Amino acid sequence: MSDRINFDLKEHNGQLNLDNFVDIIDSFQHDSIDYLYDLEPQSQNLFWAGYFCESSSGEKVEKAFYNAAYRIRKISIPMPSMEVDQNNTLRAPLFKSASFSQEITIDWTEDVYHSVKKYHLDWFARWYNRQYDVLRCGVAGKFRKLLVVAFHYVDDSESLLSQPKIQPILAFHIGGLIPIQIPELTFDYANGQNDAPVSIKYKCSKIQMSYSKEIGLGRNANIWGDAASVSSAALKDAKVWNPSGFLQDPYGPGDNELEKLRIARSATSYQPSEGAIG
Amino acid sequence: MEKRINEFSSKEHLHYAIQSAGDFLKHQFDVILVRYNKDLNAHDHIGASRITLQDKLSGKRPIDGQTYMSRAVSVSVPQMMSETYDIRSSFSTIKKIGTKVAYERKSEITFLMDEPLYILDELNAFSNNGRNLLDFDLGPDPVQKKLTPLTINSLLKGGKSRLDLIVRHNDLLNKSVDEKSFQPLWLFEDIIFLGQKDDLSFDRENADTQQIAFTFLFKRCTAIRNDVASKII
């Protein structure tokens, strides 16, 4: 069997020489089982999404949603699309336009204090002051950013007791976030559902995808916007949720006081505000 | 390969069976309920002393941790299994291991009831299912109006101290220290009793003892070998 398929178009008056495929297809069933059984699958549930804070050029973190990585249960990131027209004269598709969707959706896990909605309502107030019915000027507090990291586990040790290592695969750096749709707050005697996801839509100005250098693609692939570097330290923050002693965001208010409020063990009437969260 | 396969004669098989450890017997186990002070966090369970359960309710209750150990009838330790998915390859379907694990952080423990139903009483208190408490007067007491059936997490956990459950394989055969070190125990962290699964039943034609299964949630279940476990209990 030859290593490469010989696409000899001349042999049969421009027709492909299909004889070359006989040997290959002969073992195709057997080989496809080997290939697909060993192929590492892409998974939707291996991701970390955090570092949710105000977009700024400085190192100071402001208006952060503290420990957002534990709250974000689902995020959908749009991919670019292209429109092509069929040209009847040339009998070929011609490029018409490219579009980059700027809308993402995040499903949050809410708590008893409705911290997620409170955070976004405070954020909304940065854009529009409902009390005086006026728009706010300036950019302070209006835009947020977010980091999403897809990862998998790698274990190349022969020991049965070895611990697999985390290997980040790629990261999405999403900037210029604006909350455009906050869902309604519903109270219902006929429905005792707990922890219904709060699905919030955002517009963003930048989605930058960066491949991990460990998998050999040491460059940034920009879907949208400029090429800002992603902090490598922030890629290592994925840990298991544990209300007492869990690894917190490095930029939080400290002392874990706010998170203590949100777990069911404590009873309090305190409602965190955006400023307190960040 | 043929030589190695031939080495596994029936005689050798018997030899290895004798040399290996004894069989896992279901009835050899201890159950230990460990209650912690409210301020302790998850990292403080090692070295914490066992606290009796009677301090929450009336001090007259003649039960403590040992009572629970002796009256435990059965308990289940959930195991994990990876979920699979199918991928098509031409005319066959390939099963593949997925990135989801079938594991429910929920189990149940069955107790043989004592005649005054103290165990039922206390475990109901831990599940915050106050209406089942025998201690409360059923008269027109304003306190009774405030009792609520178990409803939400904050009621289940607010104000309660943390409760751990330890299930230990009990060594009845006086094994050596080396053998004991391989015997595991299972630590259920931060369990929450949901209430009782079985009804209390009375029957003139049946003199069976009353057993009640209590379903509980747990944060994490860890299997620990005895050398480490000895530091916990």
Image: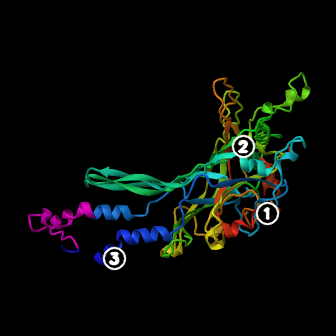
Q: Chain of mark 1?
A: B
Residue, disc 3: B4
Distance between the alpha carbons at the discs numbered 2 and 1: 21 Å
Q: Nearer the viewer, residue B193 or B62?
A: B62
Q: Earlier in the sequence, mark 2 or mark 1?
A: 1
Dots 2, 1 in contact, CB < 8 A: no
- Residue B150 colored in magenta in the image: no
Q: Which residues are drawn in magenta?
A: A4-30
Q: Are marks 3 and 1 in contact (CB under 8 Å)?
A: no
Secondary element type, mark 1: helix
Residue occupying image coordinates x 88% and y 47%: B55
Amino acid on which disc 2 is placed: Phe
The residue where tag 2 is placed is B193
- The first of marks 2 and 3 along the sequence is 3
SS at mark 2 in the image: strand
* Location of residue A226 in the rendering, given as x and y in whole percent from the top left corner: 58, 67
Pick the front one: A140 or A167: A167
At label 2, counting other C-alpha atoms closer than 10 Å, the crowd grade (few under 14, some 14-19, many 20 or more) is many
The Cα–Cα distance between marks 2 and 3, rounded to whole angstroms, is: 53 Å
Inspect this view and state whether residue A44 appears: no
Q: Are marks 3 and 1 on the same chain?
A: yes
Residue B13 image-quadrant placement: bottom left
Evaluate if marks 2 and 3 touch, with contact meaning CB atoms under 8 Å apart. no
Q: Position of residue A17 (x, y in %)?
A: 13, 65
Residue sitting at 79 percent across and 48 percent down? A265
Q: Which residue is mark 1?
A: B44
Instruction: Check the image and name the residue furthest to the left.
Output: A12
Give the residue type at disc 1.
Asp
